Amino acid sequence: MCGIVGYIGHRDAYPVIIKGLQRLEYRGYDSAGVTLFDGENIHLTKTKGKVEDLKNKVESSIPTNGKLGLGHTRWATHGVPNDVNSHPHYSNSGDLVIIHNGIIENYESIKQALVKRGYTFESDTDTEVLINLIEEVKNKEGVKLGKAVQIALNQVVGAYAIAVFDKNKPDEIVVAKLGSPLAIGIGENEYFIASDASPFIEFTNNAVYLEDEEMAIVRIGKEIKLRKIKDDAIAYPNILELQLNLEEIEKGGYDHFMLKEIYEQPKAIQDTYRGRLLADKGIIKMAGIDQNLEKFLNANRIIIVACGTSWHAGLVAEYIFEDMARIPVEVEYASEFRYRNPVITENDILIAISQSGETADTLAAIKLAKEKGAFVFGVCNVVGSSIARETHAGAYTHAGPEIGVASTKAFTTQITVLTLIALKLAQEKGTLSQSKYQEYLAELEAVPAKVEKALLSNPLVEEISETYRDSANCLYLGRGYNFPVALEGALKLKEISYIHAEGYPAAEMKHGPIALIDEQMPVVVIATKKGHYEKVVSNIQEIKSRKGRIIAIVTEGDQTVKELADHVIEVPETSESLSPLLTTIPLQLLSYHIAVMRGCNVDQPRNLAKSVTVE
């Protein structure tokens, strides 16, 4: 959540920063601000609202020249979204300026101590407390800014990614990280600072990602100076060559990033299994599994931890692992897992799933599992992310950037990776016959083309969306492999259209939710041929007899459900275990079109953030 952009170098900082903030809008935010230093004076403007509102305010209120600047988009934690609580924040003297992602948990006690020493505060934020603590240390200890930042950060508890500058040292910016991502782009006699690489990708392909509890001083004309915050030990930057390109983070002619990413799924799934799935040879190659095969084969159980959409992908994986590889699986919300004193042993494997690789709750679960001696495997999309670094091994989804806050291709590519792992283990354990194994490989290889076909339902889905755009509630039902898809479909509708929706196992409907059904209640039922088809048909009849409005997702050519449902959306036939990769497509489109018709901000839903880096 939140977005950081900074620049120091030979260019005008403002155009770099404002464009960078626009690139980071996908992260979710409620206010924005920018500060520029022209060599003599600091110019600072911030506002509740969007980056476009900030842009208009800046260009009508302050000079936009200057070779050093910081920009920020804020997702409110301490203090309501307003102009005063927005970042950047000054120190009391006005010499120091900070932008900050994360939470300082002990800010209140620090604030009270600073108040006693004469400091005053304009905002309700923990960030203003931190910048004044840095100033207090700097003045009291008589140290330079970098050292003051280090000493101050050793006094705080929480998470942070910060960028700070001192107007009396206009050739440097100090940055630091714990729990929130921070990248430094390295150009020719210039540096870029950002929450991820998207703000500076057109300027440089070289970046350093700070590790937790690292700080850096970037100075014009000098190399990056890296230190460990705890003990001041020298750290050495690992300069990565970025694979991201500009086209991947632009809309490419689509109205919204979400729609673009829905349509990218055939390619994303193919990119995820490319080089790993060799169907004609009957081989699955995954370095993270191959190098740790014995651990997986001897595991007592697999624990999957994740949040949101990734948790739903984990639920699908539970069915897949247990069905194919016959390994017991538990799926946990990462946020609950770490607080319930779970029983973890050295014979357990923990699989952590996260699109961004920065999810705070999932990272905390990883650390707990490692402390207990479990082997930890990560599934994420972002190369070099915190989860990729914290886990013992892992697999990237290779989905490309996902800019829309509501995940779509993350879900399908995570399921793809987890299916590959399950098939690999099933083959090694002998829990699948060779013919069945080979059949699954061929089916998985055919999925991208079938997703393309499922996307052809878009006009029909748009038509159905018109009928239900003003619904107050919606029920989603599925069984077996498609129960998690029902949960995911309901989540998507909630996230972007703000319609209340619930997902249930279809058989559970009669144990409570059936009381909600009347002629005003749309019910989305996943009723594909494979699996528990007859049972789901019975559930549809129960809904129909109570005048519920039925939107059914069915296998191509289905006639039985067509006679019962108000609307039928067909998807191609595939094996039951792979059906979630197809049945989720029309549900994504349904949420998208309803949200657009309701005038919602599809890519930046209210109150949500793409990467949740606080608990």
Image (spheres, rainbow, N blue to C red):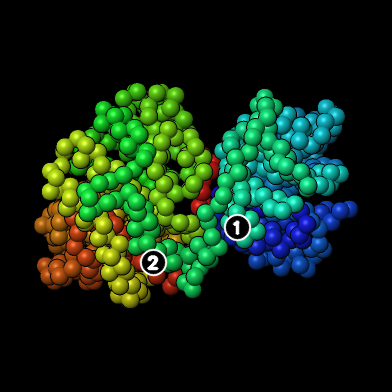
Mark with earlier residue (2, 1): 1
- Which percent across, then down, holds residue 364? 48, 34
Looking at the image, which residue is at 20% across and 40% down?
427
Q: In this rendering, would 141 be left or right of 205?
A: right
The nearer-to-camera label among 2 and 1 is 1
Using a 10 Å C-alpha cutoff, classify the residue at mark 1 as few (fewer than 14 neighbours), some (14 to 19) or many (20 or more). many
Looking at the image, which residue is at 26% across and 57% down?
445
Location of mark 2 (residue): 263
- Which percent across, then down, holds residue 530? 15, 56
Whether residue 89 appears in this view of the structure is: yes
Location of mark 1 (residue): 201
* Residue 328 quadrant: top left
Residue nearer the viewer, 225 or 327: 225
Q: In this rendering, would 358 be left or right of 70?
A: left
Residue nearer the viewer, 601 or 402: 402
Check disc 2 and report its element: helix, strand or loop. helix
Residue placed farthest to the right in the image? Answer: 40
Amino acid type, label 1: Ile
Check disc 1 and report its element: helix, strand or loop. loop
Amino acid type, label 2: Tyr
- Which percent across, then down, holds residue 107? 67, 34
Residue placed farthest to the front in the image? Answer: 281
* Residue 294 quadrant: top left
Task: Find the distance from the CA under tag 2 to the CA under tag 1.
Answer: 24 Å
